[in-house]
Amino acid sequence: MQSIDTRSRRYAAGYDGVAKFLHWLVVVLIAAQFVIGWTMPDIHKGTLPEGLIAWHLGVGATLIAAVVLRIVWRLTHRPVPASVSPLLRIVSHVTHGLLYLALIVVPVLGWANASSRGWSVKFFGVLPYPSISPEGSSVGHEMGDIHGALAWVLLALIALHVAGALYHRFVLKDDTLQRMLP
Ligand code: HEM
Ligand code: HEM
């Protein structure tokens, strides 16, 4: 039987419904951001935030809100730890930590780049987020390049993470993948 300490006694084994919903919502939004980011037109001085660029900003605003909610939920709702070897526990903690870091840094750099171009990032096209980089700032401009480069790092982390999930499912044949499934 799995031992459950008193701090996590309140929570069901694995992840609760909200954590699962937010995990998969973020997956869908990130997939959309990669597709839009790679297909939208090149951006130059004076480019207007229209068409696919507007979609990248709009989906991005929802993604930022979902990541914030996800982190707040995670900090207040600890899942019961998976029963895995100490080595795998360290590898998964490091990967999850880096994924969370990338989930913050990549969107914030994109947001800063949008602000430096004078583009407003609005939640569902209505609620404007504050500008986080002065309009015309060269640093904000460079953040756009770092945003694009770090998107590749995020993709590599996701590939590692998915490989880990499949390793659990098909090699170790344990129930780690099921912890994040409905
Ligand atoms: C994890 C989420 C995101 C991913 C995977 C992503 C991915 C990308 C990719 C692949 C590009 C094209 C880079 C290039 O071809 O050089 C791009 C550009 C851009 N993204 Fe994102 N993006 C994300 C979130 C956001 C958010 C939240 C915003 C703002 C609200 C944003 C704003 C921008 C802007 C303004 C550019 C143009 C940068 C430039 O060319 O200077 N992105 N993004
Ligand atoms: C955009 C892609 C993804 C991101 C950013 C992401 C991110 C994360 C993060 C940060 C965690 C840690 C949850 C926590 O303990 O707070 C997690 C857990 C998990 N993810 Fe993902 N994930 C992605 C895609 C996937 C996919 C495609 C799968 C399935 C093939 C998957 C399966 C899992 C599983 C099973 C867990 C729970 C692991 C455990 O119990 O220790 N994820 N994910």
Image (tube, rainbow, N blue to C red):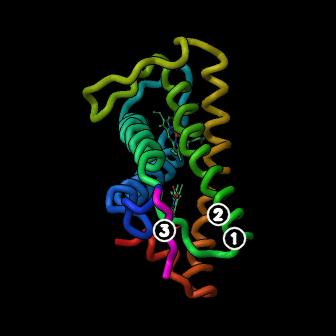
Question: Hey, what amino acid is under mark 1?
Answer: Leu
Q: Is mark 1 on a helix, strand or loop?
A: helix
Q: Please tell me whether mark 2 or mark 3 is closer to you in this view.
A: 3
Distance (Cα) linking label 2 and label 3: 20 Å
Q: What stretch is highlighted in magenta?
A: 1-6
Which one is in front, 5 or 169?
Answer: 5
**Helix, strand or loop under label 2:** helix
Where is residue 80 shown, x and y percent of the image?
49, 65
Mark 2 or 3, nearer chain start: 3
Q: Which of 152 and 23 is in front in this view?
A: 23
Q: Is residue 36 visible?
A: no
Residue under pointer 3: 4
Residue, far left? 126
Left-right relation of 40 to 100: left
Q: Which x, y percent locates residue 105? A: 59, 37
Cβ at disc 2 under 8 Å from ligand 2: yes
From this view, report whether residue 44 is shown above or below residue 81: above
Q: Is mark 3 on a helix, strand or loop?
A: loop
Name the quadrant of the C terminus.
Answer: bottom left
Distance, label 2 to label 1, CA atoms, is 6 Å
Q: Are marks 2 and 1 in contact (CB under 8 Å)?
A: yes
Q: Which residue in the structure is indicated by mark 1?
A: 88
Q: Does the magenta stretch include residue 169?
A: no
Q: Which of marks 1 and 3 is nearer the N terminus?
A: 3
CB atoms of marks 2 and 3 within 8 Å: no
Question: What residue sits 52% from the left and 12% below the top?
Answer: 135
The residue indicated by pointer 2 is 92
Residue type at mark 2 is: Ser
